[in-house]
Amino acid sequence: MAPFAFIIIGWVIGLFARAILPSMRHMGLISMLLVGMVGAVIGGMFAGTFNAPGTSLFVLQPANIVGSVIGAIAAVLIVHVLNRQRAHA
């Protein structure tokens, strides 16, 4: 259940980033959503590594949700910076 929550969080963050960052309009909606989803899953898994021993990586805990939000935002910003650098090169 938790991986789906991370994917939904990434989807929402991808939509939000597309609405907020005007320079991201060149990137398609599907690719922006995928970047947000991948970032959320990776961020949630990373935050899950700090859970109590013996628990799964995909557990809906506040720390994992915050990690997935941070991971999605980081992924979107990384893609934004890489695309901007490639456009100016």
Image: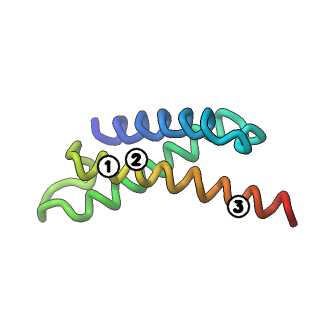
Q: Mark 2 points at which residue?
A: 69
Tell me: 74 left or right of 44. Answer: right
CB of mark 2 within 8 Å of CB of mark 1? Answer: yes
Q: Which residue is drawn at 34% across and 36% down?
A: 5
- Residue 30 found in image quarter: top right
Quote the CA–CA distance across marks 2 and 3: 20 Å
Give the amino acid type for the residue marked by disc 3 in the picture: Leu
Q: Is mark 2 on a helix, strand or loop?
A: helix
| Residue type, mark 1 in image | Val
Q: In which quarter of the image is the N terminus?
A: top left
Mark on residue 82? 3
Q: Which label sits on residue 66?
A: 1
Lower position in the chain sequence, tag 3 or tag 1: 1
Q: How many marks?
A: 3
**Label located before the other in sequence (2 or 3):** 2
Question: Which kind of residue does numbered mark 2 sit on?
Answer: Val
Residue 67's place in the image compared with 18, above or below, is below
Q: Is disc 3 in contact with disc 1, using a CB cutoff of under 8 Å?
A: no
10 Å crowding of disc 1: few (<14), some (14-19), many (20+) = some
Nearer-the-camera pick, 13 or 35: 13
